[in-house]
């Protein structure tokens, strides 16, 4: 492929007049070669697509299939059976879903969920409004958990050395282990878990350790919060967790912290944060500063984002601390890129209502500095409170794993139980955990998939999914939820409770009994039989999804007298700038979609365009455009047809501490220069058909002395290139105004500022008569100001509407099927842009361009303003998609939906048609939910209440950015939002009159720093 | 030069030119008829079932209300097929030893569901909700026919879209008072249109002919 000379990034500046937005650097550069490729509908690159069919064969096959297609129309429907219950369970109404409260554990922290169950099959997950960590919202992982449950690649049987064994054999083996270890007080027994916050499991393990005092309990999570805990210990002499009160905060400084994008309580934090960002209450708008390396969701929402290479971030924290007069930061260096003085003045002006947050990847002394700064600003008890740690008896995960490895290498371990997780894959490479494990005579792994760890274990136990398990878990604030199953284990899965129970006096106890016994003992200590008080409480907990008053009380944490000295000595190695101009920093991050690899076999998450990069199916070596230019590497859009695009990227070798990994380079605007970010979780060797073979394994570079970042990376061009499926290059803007934004000052001066320069055509400018809406008139408003770009809506839509995945090769051709996409737009200059996220579902236009071109009336306007899509009428001409200016229509080029795999059929929404090949589809505003609510209201002789219908995307949104309702009802929320001055329509000038409209973003810029 | 074609060829060519039109029209008519015939729609075709259950005996003879078995018809889109337990309410005593009821007893004792053959089978891309229809005054027999006179149940109508639309466009011709929805003996009165219009008004019945009413 020929490469045209690119315009140097440094010369890229937006045009002088007006606020300009762009999606990619190529667009900003407006290179003639790029324009030519853009407008070339039939590019030569199409030939590159391997097409095994020659033209003649193609015509033959087409002729035959045309004839056969006619014949297939004559077939009759196959006979179906109805299988009723033998004894119908109480409360079950066939055809009506039931909702059960449960909780999902991630990183040892629980999020409360309500799971929809159709005749015993969980099909959709919503947040639990009563749960403090959810408040009705969920993240992408909870949404995608349905696919994880029905994953056909899950481990299906208990095996010993590859042979299927009954559970009784395992129990017998564990008995012999127990009797052998009892003599040694458990000296050879090691248990490795992920972080545990389940009170029952923690008590079970503690009880085991009390019987076998020499046994050890190790914990490992590759994204563990060890640094935060060590920082708390440094500052307070004790491990505490911090809970933030964003609704109280006027000025927030996030130091490498992505509190909106992940971590404990992120959904709640996003909601609280958004509640203080409403331009209608401009006086209350908080201001967010983000100091970070890789652009994150938090950085994208920040009013001021400072991109620093990883090694500089602790230095910036030191500089800020010194500016605030915190003791322990006397050696603070000069930081040129961050206006520390201005931030410090803003913080000092908001004593008691400011907040400083350090990210989990920062070294302990930065956490301690943040504690000291919050203390100095009087924020403690106002914008943040301290509590006991959520993790049960927390340890530093890295130390814990290192100790285990040392013991294994020394031959001190007779039996190792790995309960969950995949440490062989995720452990730091220098520990050589997998090789050390081989020295243990008995290795047991409880895991959901046959992965890298099961490969090295004697026993592989299929782990029950959380939707199949009884358990309990604590939320970010300590609130306990009982985890209850929605379905019996599909593949005989077991929980950690059962494996620990196998070493107890009563190895056959079910997890239900284990969890209940624990809580019975708490409610009525000493009671042998469940008491009436316990039964009543238990039923209430299960129903509500939370155990009342179980949140941790706020506790005091006083700065230790010697904390300043400790911070001083810890920070000394950071004070001097050791990074040379030609050496690179490397930063490791959990992947935003597959995390540490635990979701690698989830195709919904693999195909979900990652926030910021919009990559699917791969990770990449992420650098700044200027660094890529300097290295003379980069990605070039290569077109496979019209507006559709892919990136062909150079492969590079990353050399770090003597180890080398090869990956594709991917320049990201806003990324700091002279450093590279790599995401973990890819390059899996085992773990399922979807997991294996995507991206590269960044763990192969991650060492225990550089867990999150480190200096000394070398990047060398490896030769060869690699296609990346990046959706950012699909559907380009071509200079049209797509997103609108203003600063707070501009907005206060003129609330209609976002409409300047835009012109709406008159409503009469159409040949067609107006529609009249006598009943409902559905509409949607999406607040770009509130959207954090978390993608939960995209996966929720996918789960609700039976949307298939298409695979990387099809995404490269621009054929992804998401009905709702989140577009990201950049504003400002190339090396320090502002980022905006704009979710785009079907606009349901009043003058819909798609409706008038359909030759078979398969897409028509409904009496309630919906743009109906009738799958059984569609013949696949794709005229509608061609004529849609928003590009929200999706075509089933191939049979994307899996019609064969039995387990996947269980997870589909029975209320939504499963589409086949050759059919156009698109967002319906969740018409199945509209119809359901309408039927319910009609049966009660009333109108649908405002808020009664929540579309799938709206229901999960943590910041309430999406609002749906009846535009004919002037009191409805959506009507109120559409009446706001910020309200704008996409491509207004085309006179499509969309009924999905947007509310412009408003940034609360510090006038002292400026935009 | 002699004529190549005989004079009669003119007639033949005229007849065949017009004939083609008729043949094509006839073929289309034939296809339409086949499509609407019971061969395609399964209307009036009694299906073989694992148990020779007679609605005639239970509804016509014993006068059991539809909702005794089809319990969810007022609450859900699915009217509900009774669990074996419902059969056993009576048949643990009545005809308990009948060989015809052996599958029912086996099902109950072995905890194995009875697999009934579906009689009213809508295509998968159609969403139908029983509850809203009965609450708006569409009687059971309006769609399902005289169930009380059917020894083996058979579909009475084509269940094709034109049949659905007959009522969705003209509900007044079919609706009945809510009190008579579950009556199997109800006969439309002579002044159906007059009563129908009043009921349409009273029950606020809408003429829902949007695609997304059923296709979702």
Image (tube, rainbow, N blue to C red):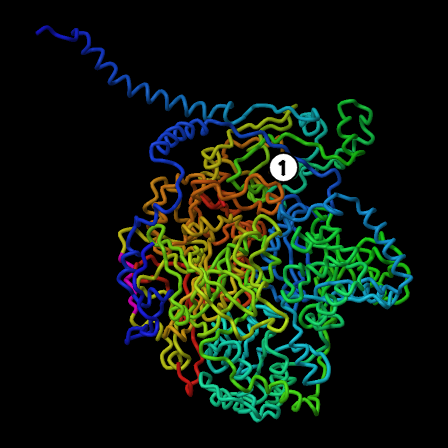
Residue A471 locus on image (x, y percent): 75, 59
As rendered, which of A613 and A45 lies closer to the eye? A45
Name the residue at 59% across, 35% down: B140
Residue A321 locus on image (x, y percent): 56, 88
Kindly identify which chain the residue marked by label 1 belongs to.
Answer: B
Q: Main secondary structure of the magenta part?
A: loop
As rendered, which of A233 and A572 lies closer to the eye? A572
Q: Which residues are magenta?
A: A758-765
The magenta stretch spans residue A652: no
Left or right of residue A538: residue A986: left
Q: Quadrant of the N terminus of chain A?
A: bottom left
Q: Which residue is mark 1?
A: B182
Residue A100 locus on image (x, y percent): 68, 55
As rendered, which of B165 and A9 lies closer to the eye? A9
The magenta stretch spans residue A761: yes
Residue B46 locus on image (x, y percent): 60, 23
Extreme residue toward the front, this view = A658
Relative vertical location of residue A679 with respect to residue A487 in this rendering, above or below: below
- Element type at mark 1: loop
């Amino acid at each position: 492929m020929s490469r045209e000379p690119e315009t140097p990034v440094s010369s890229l500046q937006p045009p002088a007049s007006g606020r300009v937005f762009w999606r990619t650097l190529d667009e900003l550069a407006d290179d003639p070669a790029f324009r030519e490729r853009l407008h070339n509908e039939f590019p030569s690159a199409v030939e590159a697509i391997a097409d095994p069919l020659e033209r003649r064969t193609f015509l033959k096959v087409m002729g035959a299939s045309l004839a056969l297609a006619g014949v297939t129309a004559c077939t009759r429907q196959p006979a179906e059976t109805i299988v009723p219950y033998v004894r119908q369970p109480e409360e079950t109404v066939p055809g009506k879903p039931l909702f059960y409260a449960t909780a999902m554990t991630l990183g040892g922290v629980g999020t409360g969920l309500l799971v929809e169950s159709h005749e015993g099959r969980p099909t959709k997950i919503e947040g639990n409004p009563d749960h403090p960590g959810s408040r009705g919202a969920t993240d992408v992982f909870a949404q995608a958990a349905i696919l994880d449950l029905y994953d056909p690649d899950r481990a299906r049987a208990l095996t010993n050395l590859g042979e299927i064994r009954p559970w009784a054999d395992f129990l017998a083996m564990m008995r012999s282990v127990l009797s052998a270890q009892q003599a040694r007080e458990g000296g050879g027994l090691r248990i490795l878990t992920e972080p545990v916050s389940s009170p029952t499991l923690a008590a079970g393990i503690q009880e085991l350790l009390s019987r076998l005092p020499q046994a050890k309990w190790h914990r490992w999570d590759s994204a563990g919060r060890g640094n935060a805990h060590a920082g708390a210990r440094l500052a307070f002499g004790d491990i505490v967790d911090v809970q933030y009160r964003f609704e109280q905060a006027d000025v927030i400084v996030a130091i490498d912290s992505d509190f909106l994008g992940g971590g404990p309580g992120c959904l709640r934090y996003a909601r609280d944060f958004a509640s203080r960002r409403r331009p209608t209450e401009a006086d209350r708008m908080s201001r967010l500063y983000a100091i970070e390396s890789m652009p994150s969701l938090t950085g994208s929402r920040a009013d001021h984002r400072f991109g620093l290479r990883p090694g500089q971030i602790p230095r910036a924290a030191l500089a800020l601390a010194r500016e605030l007069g915190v003791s322990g930061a006397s050696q603070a260096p000069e930081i040129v890129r961050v206006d520390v003085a201005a931030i410090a003045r803003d913080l000092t002006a908001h004593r008691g209502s400011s907040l400083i947050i350090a990210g989990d990847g920062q070294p302990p002394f930065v956490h301690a500095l943040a504690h000291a700064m919050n203390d100095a600003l009087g924020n403690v008890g106002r914008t943040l409170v301290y509590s006991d740690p959520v993790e049960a008896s927390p340890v530093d995960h890295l130390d814990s794993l290192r100790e285990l490895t040392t013991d294994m290498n020394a031959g001190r371990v007779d039996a190792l139980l790995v309960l969950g997780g995949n440490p062989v894959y995720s452990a730091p490479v220098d520990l050589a955990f997998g090789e050390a494990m081989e020295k243990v005579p008995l290795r047991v792994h409880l895991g959901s998939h046959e992965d890298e760890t099961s490969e090295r274990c004697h026993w592989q136990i299929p782990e029950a999914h959380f939707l199949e398990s009884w358990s309990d878990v604590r939320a970010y604030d300590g609130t306990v939820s009982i985890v209850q199953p929605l379905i019996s284990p599909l593949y005989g899965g077991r929980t950690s409770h059962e494996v620990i129970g196998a070493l107890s006096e009563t190895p056959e106890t079910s997890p239900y009994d284990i969890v209940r016994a624990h809580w019975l003992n708490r409610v009525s200590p000493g009671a042998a039989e469940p008491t009436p008080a316990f039964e009543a409480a238990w039923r209430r907990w299960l129903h509500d999804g939370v155990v009342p008053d179980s949140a941790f009380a706020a506790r005091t944490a006083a700065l230790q007298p010697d904390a300043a000295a400790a911070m001083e000595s810890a920070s000394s190695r950071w004070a001097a700038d050791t990074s040379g101009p030609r050496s690179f920093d490397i930063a490791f991050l959990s992947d935003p979609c597959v995390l540490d690899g635990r979701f690698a076999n989830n195709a919904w998450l693999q195909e979900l365009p990652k926030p910021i990069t919009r990559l699917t199916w791969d990770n990449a070596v992420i650098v700044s455009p200027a660094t890529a230019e300097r290295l003379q590497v980069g990605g070039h859009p290569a077109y496979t047809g019209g507006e559709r695009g892919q990136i062909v990227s150079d492969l590079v070798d990353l050399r770090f501490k003597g180890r080398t990994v090869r990956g594709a380079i991917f320049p990201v605007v806003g990324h700091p220069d002279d450093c590279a970010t790599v995401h973990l979780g890819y390059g899996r060797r085992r773990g399922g058909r979807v997991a294996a073979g995507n991206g590269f394994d960044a763990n192969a570079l991650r060492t225990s002395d550089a867990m999150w970042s480190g200096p000394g990376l070398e990047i060398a061009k490896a030769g060869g290139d690699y296609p990346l499926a990046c959706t950012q290059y699909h559907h380009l803007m071509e200079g049209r105004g797509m997103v609108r934004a203003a600063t707070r000052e501009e907005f206060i001066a003129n609330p209609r500022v976002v409409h300047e320069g835009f012109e709406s055509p008159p409503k009469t400018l159409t040949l067609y008569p107006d529609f009249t809406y006598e009943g409902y008139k559905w509409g949607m408003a999406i607040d770009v100001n509130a959207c954090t770009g978390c993608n939960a809506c995209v996966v929720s839509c996918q789960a609700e509407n039976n949307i298939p995945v298409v695979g990387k090769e099809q995404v490269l051709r621009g054929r992804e099927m998401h009905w709702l996409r989140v577009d990201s737009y950049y504003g400002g200059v190339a090396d320090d842009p502002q980022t905006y996220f704009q979710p785009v579902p079907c606009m349901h236009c009043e003058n819909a361009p798609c409706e008038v071109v359909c030759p078979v009336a398969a897409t028509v306007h409904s009496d309630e303003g919906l743009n109906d899509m009738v799958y059984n009428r569609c013949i696949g001409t794709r005229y509608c998609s061609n004529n849609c200016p928003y590009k929200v229509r999706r075509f089933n080029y191939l049979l994307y939906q899996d019609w064969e795999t039995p387990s996947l059929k269980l997870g589909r929404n029975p209320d939504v048609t499963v589409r086949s090949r050759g059919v156009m589809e698109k967002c319906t505003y969740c018409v199945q939910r509209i119809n359901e609510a309408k039927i319910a209201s009609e049966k009660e002789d009333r109108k649908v209440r405002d808020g009664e219908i929540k579309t799938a995307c709206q229901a999960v949104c943590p910041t309430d950015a999406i609002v749906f309702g009846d535009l004919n009802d002037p009191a409805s929320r959506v009507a109120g939002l559409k009446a706001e001055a910020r309200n704008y329509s996409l491509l207004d000038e085309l006179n499509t009159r969309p009924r999905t409209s947007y509310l412009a973003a408003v940034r609360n810029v510090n006038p002292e720093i400026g935009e | 030069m002699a004529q190549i074609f005989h004079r009669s060829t003119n007639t033949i060519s005229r007849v065949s030119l017009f004939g083609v039109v008729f043949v094509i029209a006839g073929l289309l008519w034939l296809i339409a008829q086949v499509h609407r015939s019971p061969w395609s729609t399964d209307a009036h075709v009694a299906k073989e079932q694992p148990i020779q259950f007679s609605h005639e005996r239970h509804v016509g003879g014993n006068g059991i209300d539809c909702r005794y078995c089809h319990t969810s018809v007022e609450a859900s889109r699915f009217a509900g097929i009774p669990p074996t337990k419902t059969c056993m309410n009576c048949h643990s005593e009545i005809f308990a030893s009948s060989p015809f009821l052996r599958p029912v007893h086996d099902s109950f004792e072995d905890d194995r569901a009875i697999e009934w053959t579906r009689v009213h089978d809508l295509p998968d891309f159609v969403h139908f909700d029983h509850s809203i229809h009965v609450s708006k005054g569409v009687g059971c027999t309006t769609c399902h026919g005289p169930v009380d006179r059917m020894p083996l149940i058979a579909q009475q109508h084509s269940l094709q879209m034109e049949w659905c639309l007959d009522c969705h466009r003209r509900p007044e011709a079919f609706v009945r008072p809510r009190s008579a929805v579950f009556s199997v003996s109800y006969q439309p009165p002579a002044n159906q249109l007059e009563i129908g219009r009043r009921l349409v008004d009273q029950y606020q019945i809408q003429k829902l002919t949007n695609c997304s009413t059923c296709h979702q």
